[in-house]
Every structure is written in structure tokens, then in C-alpha cells.
Amino acid sequence: MNNLEQTQFITVIALVIFAAMMIAIGAYSARKTKTMDGFLLGGRQIGAWVSAFAYGTSYFSAVIFVGYAGQHGWNIGLGSLWIGVGNAIFGCLLAWLLLARRTRTMTHTLKSKTMPEFFEGRFQSTKMKVFAAAIIFIFLVPYSAAVYKGLGSMFTTIFPTVSVNTWMLFIAVLTGVYLVLGGYVATAYTDFVQGIIMIVGVIAMVISIVKNPAVGGFTHFFENLKSIDNGGEIGRQITSWYGGGSWKFLCVNILLTSFGTWGLPQMVSKYYAVKDVKSIHKATVISTAFALIIGAGAYFVGSLSRLVLNNTMPEGGVDAVIPNTLLTALGDWNIVTTIILAVILILLLSASMSTLSSIVLSSASAISVDFIPVVKKNYHPSHQMILTRGLCIIFVALSYIFATSNITIIVNIMSFSWGIVSGCFIGPYLWGIYSKRTTKMGAWAGMILGFATVTITTVVLTIMNLPDGGGLYEAFGIAAKKAPEMGVAAMAVSLAAVPIVSMFTKKFDEKFVEGVFTPATEIE
């Protein structure tokens, strides 16, 4: 057995064990999903560790390791670590501290299982629920295809005769099986297992890269980075702890990827399901630590990539940076490096599947729970359960189709999804749980203006970059590069519009508002 065959053998064993664990968890969880509340929220009895890991693994998909960490680590350098730190502090710690308890309490009061249902109950608007469901369906389903990103470079190197599409199909089928069997419970418990794998994988990744002779260990990596380009502009840029000339770009990405999670339904739903206040306190600490390890670890590896790759951009561009860095650093193919590679491959699978399952569950419920009951009266709960499971399968299939199709418009939509969804929801959601003075029109203003900020700006930029004689996709691609700035602007507009419009529009009945803001002690 040669080195490649040995690597393939160990990797296949790891994949079989991993797949068996995921399916077993799905089958075990099936008994807890007899009701819609159980299927979507685990009966609101999910403990601290599982809730925290479910939040963290949904936060970080394979995109961070292969896409963002490779791109920002290569271009920005050590300053990119602040994205990981910002995600931990603002996206996890501050989010759990400010949102979790109030969200859990109010969704209990309103009996909301989804974010659109929350909007309907909080602002007494069925139309708002339908609008929110449409936003989730239109922009989260194409976005889910992005979670497959980067797997091909790693897997096809070890299994050169197996196509990239085959590996993506493996993810889709495995995710669909355990999600349909066990719903949110299966997702949460598989996320816990996947979270452990992600932590082990990131630690193994960091140690393997740092030990590479080109990096020079923890004591010499900084000097070696600084000496790139003979201490010239590149060396100064990648060793700047504040991002150097890219500090504005760095700040925008910290804001988008950290505060953007505050308005994403697949993230907010984790607060609905947590068991009690004590669990919230524990989950806050655990999710923050998890995010710090995963985020900082990924960007740290990306910042060292220039050393491992001899300051040469690999074929395939920035998306190939991390795969080539790992394969170069672990290229001696001994038993230790083979095991490490297998763990990292499972890490990428875990990151993709956890995010995919969370997005698909939010998308399926947007149709079965939030949209269908509005247009179809006498909608029986048993039909709702069957439809939700069926939609999970359909949406997993759609994500696979989008990921395997070279459709430019879909790829560009992915770039805007994060900003559009969070830009629509963050204002009405945040003010809805905090301010009794928030009105229906204020909430509508936050949603519409947040959405318009991204869409109108995109149309304007596309027209401005449209060359004579066509080139719509190319112009749209140029506009897509401004997606982070547009996302941050949309969130700011949404947060500002809600209280301003609420000051001048009709308030809710005082008795209704007091009922919505039930003191936590009455529920907890």
C-alpha cells in the first residue's frame, strides 16, 4: 500500500465512522420530534453545551476555513485575526448577553417557533410574517449552496478519481437523512459532535502549520512573516496588527460577520430552544470560547499561508490557499500527517453540514409554518410535520443543485444573502424585544428600508458598471464586491429606521404590550 492509498484508506474509515454517528444520532432523536415544537425547537429543552455548540457550528461553515481565512489571511495577514476575535466578542458573547434571555422569554409568551411567527405575534401582522418567510426562502436557500465551498480542493487531492460533485452529494444525503429523522434535536446533537471535531481539527491544523520549517514555530513566525518581500510593503502589511492599509475593509468585515448574526433566523432560533436561564449563562461562555478557537485559529492559519507557500499564490486563487497550505505542510504522508489530514477533512465536512442543516431547517419552516397556513385554511398539524420533512429534503436537494451548477446569478445572490436577511430583520427583532414603544409601522420601515438599502444600491452599482452592449453578469459581479459594505449599511438603516418611524406612528394597545413583555420570572 503506497502513501496515497494509505491516506485514502484511513480517510474512508474516518468518513464511515462519522456518517454512522450522524445517522445514529438522527435515529435516536426521532422519538423527540412527534410535534412541530419538538421538530423545530427540540421541545425548548436543549441544554447549555448543546445549545452553545449548535450556535457555534451554525456560525462557522467550511467557507471560513477555505474562503475567508485564505483570502483575508493572505491579503491582510495577522490583522485578519480580529475578524475571529470580533465574531467571538460581538457575534457570540454580546449576542448571547443581550438577546438570548429576552428572546427565549418573548417567544415563549408568543408561542413562536420561527422568526416570522415572532414578527407576526409581536407586531400583530400576518403580512409581515409572510414577507419575512419570503425573504428567508429566497435568500437562504441559494446561500446554503455556499457551505459546500472549498471541499473539492481537499477531497479531490486525496481522491483524484472521485469528482467534487460526488463529495457534495455525500454531504447533501447525509445531512438530509439525520435532519429529516430528528429535526432540530438531531441537528443540535450532531452539531455538538461536529463542534468537538472542529475544535480538534483546528488545533491540529494550527500546530501542523506552525511546526512547518518555513513558519519557524511560535517564536519565529512573526519575524519570518516580516521578512517576506525583504521587509517591503507586503511584509509590513501582513504583520500589522491593525490591518495596515486594509483596516477599513477589516472593520467592515468584522461588523458584518459579527453583528450580522443578530438578525439571521438560523442563529436566533438557538435562543428559542435553550432550556432555562442557567443554561443561557453557561452557553454564553461556551459559545464565545468555541468561536474564539475556531475563528482565530482559521485566520491565524491563513495569515501564515504566505510562508508555507513561499509567497506564491496557488493555482485556483485565494480559495486554494488553505488547501494548498495544508497539503504542503503535511505533504510527507506519514501516518501522523495522514491522520491529521483525515481529521481536517472531517472538520470541513462538519462545518459544512452543521451550517447547511441549520439553514435548511429555517428555510423549510418558513414555508410549512409561516407561509402555507396563511394561504391554506384548516391546515392540519400532522400535514405540517410531513410537509416540513419533505421540504427539508427538497431544500437540501436545491442547495446541491445550486452548488453544482455554474449559474453566475446564484453565486452572486449568495454574496448578498447575509446582508439582506440580517438587514431586514435586525432592526424589528432587536427593538421588538427591547422597546415597548416599537410600532408596527416602525417594524415595517426597518424591514423594507433594510432590504431596499442592499437591493437599490446593487441595481445602481450594476447599472454604473454595465458596459455598452451587455455584460449584465459581469456588472453584477462588480457590484457584489461591495456586498459587505451594503450589508453593514442595511443593518444600520434598519436599526435607525425602527425607532424613528415608531416615534410618529400609532402605538400598540398598552394591555397588549404588557402581555408581550411578560416578566421572565413568570416563564422561567
Image: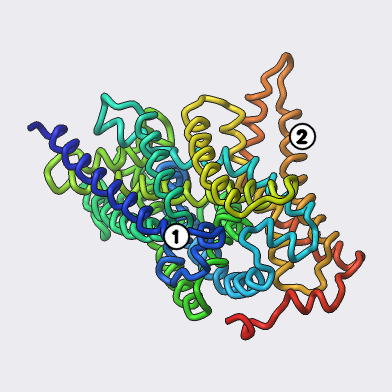
Residue at which label 1 appears: 185
Residue 56: x and y, percent? 45, 60
In front: 212, or 105? 105
Q: Residue at x 36, y 46 (%)?
A: 348
Q: Which residue is mark 2?
A: 460
User: Is residue 223 in sight in this rendering?
Assistant: no
Residue mark closest to the camera, 2 vs 1: 1
Which amino acid, by three-letter code, is at mark 1? Answer: Val
Q: How many marks?
A: 2
The image shows residue 379 at horizontal and vertical percentages of 68, 50
Mark 1 residue element:
helix
Q: Quadrant of residue 460?
A: top right
SS state under label 2 = helix
> Which residue reaches farthest bottom?
521
Displayed quadrant of residue 32: bottom left
Density class for disc 2 (Cα within 10 Å; few <14, some 14-19, many ≥20) is few
Residue closer to the observer: 523 or 73: 523
- Dot 1: few (<14), some (14–19), or many (≥20) neighbours within 10 Å? many
Residue at image position (51%, 66%) is 43
Residue 332 lies left or right of residue 22; in this view the side is: left
Identity, as a three-letter code, of the amino acid under mark 2:
Val
Which of the two labelled residues, at mark 2 and mark 1, occupies the earlier sequence position? 1
Residue 353 image point, x, y percent: 41, 47
